[in-house]
Amino acid sequence: MTDLTLTMKYRPNQRVDMSPITCDKLAGLELAEIAAIELQNGKRKIRVDDLFSLTGSDVCNIHIENSFAKLDYIGHGLEGGNIRVTGDVGAYLAMEMRSGQITVSGNTGIYAACQMKNGLLQVIGNVGDFLGGALSGNKKGLQGGTVIIRGNAGDRVGDHMRRGMVMIEGDAGDYCGSRMTAGTIAVMGKTGRNIGYGMRRGTLLLWQQPKIPATFGDCGTHTFSFLPMVFDAISKFDSKFSDSSKHFNRVHRYGGDMAEIGQGEILVQVDSA
Amino acid sequence: MIINGVMIDHTFAEAFPMKATRVIITAQTEQWAFNAAKSMTGFATSVIGCGCEADIECFLKPSETPDGRPGVSAMLFTMGAKSLVKQLETRAGQSVLTSPTSALFSGIDGGIRIPLGKNLRYFGDGFQTSKVINDNRYWRIPVMDGEFLVEETTGQVNAIGGGNLLILAESEADALEACEKAVLEMRKVANIILPFPGGVVRSGSKVGSKYPALTASTNDAFCPTLKGITKSELSPEIESVMEIVIDGLTEADIKKAMKVGIETFCSIGAYNGVKRISAGNYGGKLGPYHFHLQEIMND
């Protein structure tokens, strides 16, 4: 059985809601039934086979080819299975995903991994704002699982994040870890202004010194035995984070945000040399 | 059965069900992991008076521990689940939390999960934080030397306590030397502990006493100084008897340890004072697990 492959025929002007195309929702459907599914496209609906040519039949492994930045809600609420995307994707990638794996070869729009509950999301390119965040008005962003970004991330990474692990190989924008309740965000590159803004709990693990906000307290330099365990846990993923030469257990700790309950922390790698 | 001049009695060790857990203690050095583990498993020879039976199981290399530091594996056994939870928490709190550079992890999966750091975390007075790593929650409790890392729960499994061997020797020195050698070999067996000091007991007990307040008293049938005045199990040449008690996770583990012990005693031989090997039992009335010495050697 070969992967169910959806190859995009053309790029519509309006955005497309891809939420009906997940492994669990397609389970048990024949190819003709999948082709007949209607996707919201702007204010109208279009059939899947109008937009994509379909091959293969394994709905547990979906491959979307020639994707572009107006395909929203890919992997929405995914419960098991594997979605592989070649190209860019739109907003709300892996929103409320519960399990399974999504890999995107290009860039994503805003709200990737929004309110995601579990599973693995990997993006080879860059991601927009609110990675792992919560929708406006909601209080729970990323609630579990692992997010790996090979490129850069926009502003507000992990806004209201509650649990889980976000790893960014590149840079992160402003307000990284804002209003974070728990979990871990690791950033190898640079971070923007107002890091940890309104952070309640959780860990921001950084390879480069950020500009520390005034509402974070300097707790000094420490060696933590939990860090090797964190690195060991993430070493199984295909990313720079599995490179042991980039691992450390000695960090400078900043506690905050003291304007909130102050139980969060920014841990910055200390060069042991 | 006689091996190398050592008579193996046609009898059995009687053991009973217990609840057990295993924890892994790590520290900056093996010595400090040992210090914490020794304290945690201290005063834990017998459930009769200590509330639990505990001992260090083995030392662990950094590559074998969760945080990559030197470690020690320790096991605790109790008669019931509630007492295991209480003993574990008290001992972890007083002996491991307090020990410099230590960290404490679950050493066993399966069974049901019982608190390890789940309540200890409140020592952090609100400054404690948790981290979920590989689906396990760990608590980071700020302490004066830095941070105490402790896994939230550990596993509680059904286990067996009270496996035992009695060695009957021509002299106290012969008995002790043989026991030391046997303990050394038996401790290489996984999933067992020998909870008494140095792994050896010199005061084996029988059930009951002439004094109503006591539930156990000296095993007079095996006391060499009482040979002439009680219903003794000892022949004239026996001058000293010592016991090795074994708690283990499974019957197979205890059998394996007992076999290693018997083989060691037999290899020392009758020429070196080891005359007989026996075992303690209560006529089969106390525990459902019967470890027949001769059957173990024939397996």
Image (cartoon, grey):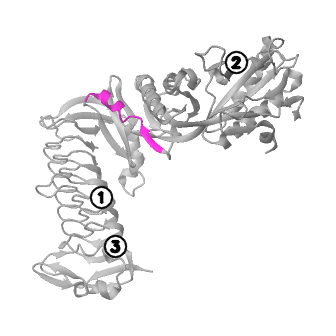
Vertical placement of residue A175 versus A218, above or below? below
Q: Where is residue B3 shown, x and y percent of the image?
A: 87, 33
Q: Residue at x 17, y 36 (%)?
A: A261
Q: Mark 3 against mark 1, which lies toward the viewer? A: 3
Residue B113 is a magenta residue:
yes
What residue is rendered at 16% in x and 34% in y?
A216
User: Which quarter of the image is occupied by the C terminus of chain B?
Assistant: top right
Q: SS for tag 1?
A: loop
Toward which corner of the image does residue A33 lie, by quadrant?
A: bottom left
User: Is A202 placed left or right of B239 in the picture?
Assistant: left
Residue A131, image x and y in percent?
21, 57
Q: Inspect this view and state whether residue A55 appears.
A: yes
Cβ atoms under marks 2 and 1 closer than 8 Å: no
Frontmost residue, A234 versus A124: A234
* Marks 2 & 1 on one chain: no
Q: Quadrant of residue B180?
A: top right
Residue type indicated by callout 2: Arg
Q: Which residue is disc 1 drawn over? A: A150
Kindly identify which chain the residue marked by label 1 belongs to.
A
Q: Give the residue type at disc 1.
A: Arg
Label 2 element class? loop
- Left or right: residue A250 compared with residue A171: right
Q: Is residue A85 magenta?
A: no
- Residue underneath mark 2: B202
Tell which subunit mark 3 falls on.
Answer: A
Q: Is residue A53 visible?
A: no
Q: Where is mark 3, residue-wise? A: A23
Q: Which residues are magenta?
A: B112-125
SS at mark 3 in the image: helix
Q: Residues within 10 Å of mark 3 (few under 14, many from 20)?
A: many
